[in-house]
Image (cartoon, rainbow, N blue to C red):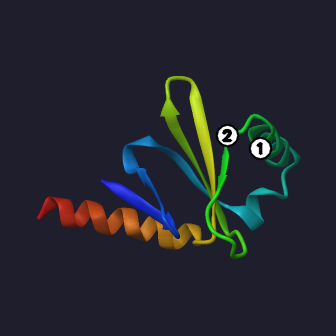
Amino acid sequence: MYLHLGVDSVVRCRDIIGIFDLDNTTVSKITRETLNKSEKNGETVTVGFDIPKSFVVCAEKRGENKVYISPVTPATLTRRIKQKKIGAAD
């Protein structure tokens, strides 16, 4: 199963480590440092040009993570995953 993150970006659901609210989590200095490090290492992908609302951490390859900055809210992304899992059971 794949999760649509916005615009033309999709990721495999099994690769997702976490979905985070950008407003709530960037209050933490550790989160800001982690996001900055990810960007400096070229591991960050910005999805679209709208205001970012979430970031999704994915394990792309062994030992490599990608951080997708998405304009879609974490609640919507989570709902999409749940709907796919329900649909897959049918």
Q: Quadrant of the C terminus?
A: bottom left
Point out residue 9 in the picture as x, y percentages from the top left corner.
49, 60
Q: Label 1 crowding class (10 Å Cα cut-off): few <14, some 14-19, many 20+? A: some
Q: Is residue 86 above or below residue 68?
A: below
- The residue that mark 1 highlights is 39
Marks 2/1 in contact by CB < 8 Å: the verdict is yes
**Residue lying farthest right?**
29
What amino acid type should be assigned to the residue bearing mark 2? Glu
What amino acid type should be assigned to the residue bearing mark 1? Glu
Which of the 4 image quarters holds residue 3? bottom left
Foreground pick, 5 / 27: 5
Q: Secondary structure at mark 2?
A: loop
Point out residue 85 in the picture as x, y percentages from the top left corner.
27, 60
Q: Secondary structure at mark 1?
A: helix
Image point (49%, 73%), residue name: 76
Point out residue 48 in the picture as x, y percentages from the top left corner.
63, 68
- The residue that mark 2 highlights is 43
**71 relative position to 33: left or right:** left
